[in-house]
Image (cartoon, grey):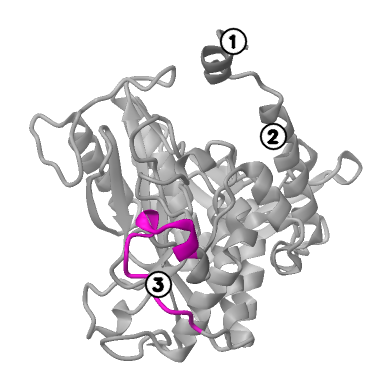
Amino acid sequence: METSDVLKLADKKGVKFIQLWFTDIIGNLKSVTIPRNQLKDALEQGKGFDGSSIEGFTRIHESDTVAKPDPNTFAILPWSSKEERQARMFCDILMPDKTPYEGDPRYVLKKNLAEAKKMGFAYYVGPEIEYFYFKDSQGTGLLDRSGYFDLTPPDFGDDLRMKTIEVLEEMGIPVEASHHEVAPSQHEIDLVYQDALTMADYTMTYKLVVKEIAQQHGVYATFMPKPIFGVNGSGMHTHQSLFKDGKNAFYGDSESLSKTGQEFMVGLLRHAQEITLITNQWVNSYKRLVPGYEAPVYISWARRNRSTLVRVPAYFPNRVNAARVEYRSPDPACNPYFAFAAMLQVGLEGIRKHYELPKPVERDIFEMSWEERNEAGISYLPESLGEAISHIKRSALVKRTLGNSVFDKLMENKKTIWEEYRSQVTQYEIEKNLPVL
């Protein structure tokens, strides 16, 4: 879409205000709102703002940054009133000289996609984004007691999901399916497979829309990975593949991935520990990555076994475009720009270095003994944010993926969070230790 197309569409739809969206390094959505009369200038020149106030952005002595809207992301916000109709556009963050700002998560993903393009590949992803509905943000009051795929009328959560899908599709975001998830009051909406940059923008929009529709109906939606002890947490299983010359480069035959697909998958396996801080960036993320709740713990792959980290789905084995790998550890509280960039880059590393495919593990890994796992060469994902930090800080590959500046700022942020958390005295310790120590 060109600038002139955006201006015409804004006038046709009666748009009064435009929200310019971008994210900080944590993946928090940020916005600068401009009136319609500033739209042409924003599209041509961008909108200046103080980057030093954004987590992980510039230092105070170099704070001037520019948000340059991407006209292809123009969409009306359906919940805005007709009298004050609003639209949104995602922005690329630039320096005053109009060069890309290296700390912009959208730029980080673009940079890695450009590297894939030089190798002849386009990267496509399809995340399964799970979340919970609660009565409010102060606790975990459930809206239902349903389970996986349940349809138990009256289901308020199901109605909210349908309303959310209507809004997403009105914004031009195609939905593939939706359903109730395993845990009570847990839901999932799956978006149609897209190129990674488009999907990262869609993912940020999805999370806002889910929360907006929930709020409109007096409840709270959360993407916290593990809000309730004793039930499944929320994941963001990410299906992914590379396309080359318009064809799926992962398709081998009805039984296996191509050599390219296999090498990409092994890249995910070999570097899983290094990228876990990116795909699972919060202290709470590691409360989900524990045995017994369908989330992956051990680093292995399979075709049918859902206890593995990487799975090769076989829903439609003879459909070329359906060939893909599913990476199961990410959670929906990650920064999708960084998560997609990291998964892409480690997959490409597998292709560059021709990693050899290990044997699949088609039995329940949680039922295997330590000796059996050790004999099979199965290692495990980090068990805490602190352990994830120790893995990523040694990774030259992840540092190159993010860029030195982003890498250092992200490490600083996560180290601060981990130090703050590990110094806390929890209710668990009070209940278990105080009476006996």
Cα separation, mark 3 vs mark 2, equals 32 Å
- The residue carrying pointer 1 sits among few (fewer than 14), some (14 to 19) or many (20 or more) residues within 10 Å by Cα, namely few
> Which amino acid type is marked by label 3?
Val
- The residue carrying pointer 2 sits among few (fewer than 14), some (14 to 19) or many (20 or more) residues within 10 Å by Cα, namely some
* Front-most of residues 348 and 215: 348
Per the image, the residue denoted by label 3 is 325
Q: Which segment is the magenta one? A: 357-373
Mark 1 residue element: loop
Q: Position of residue 256 (x, y in %)?
A: 34, 85
The residue positioned 76% from the left and 67% from the top of the image is: 396
Residue 254 is a magenta residue: no
Badge 2 or badge 1: first in the primary sequence:
2
The residue positioned 66% from the left and 62% from the top of the image is: 107
The answer to whether residue 278 is above or below residue 132 is: below
The residue positioned 50% from the left and 43% from the top of the image is: 333
Q: Pointers 3 and 2 in contact (CB under 8 A)?
A: no
Considering the image in quadrants, where does the C terminus appear? top right
Left/right of residue 189 with respect to residue 124 in the rendered view: left
Residue 361 is a magenta residue: yes
The answer to whether residue 249 is above or below residue 199 is: below
Per the image, the residue denoted by label 2 is 417
Left/right of residue 154 with respect to residue 97 in the rendered view: left
Badge 1 or badge 3: first in the primary sequence:
3
Q: Position of residue 245 (x, y in %)?
A: 45, 91
Residue 307 visible in the displayed image? yes
Mark 3 residue element: strand
* Front-most of residues 340 and 51: 340
Q: Position of residue 167 (x, y in %)?
A: 30, 45
Badge 3 or badge 2: first in the primary sequence:
3
Q: Going by the picture, which residue comes out furthest to the right?
A: 61
Q: Going by the picture, which residue comes out furthest to the top?
A: 435
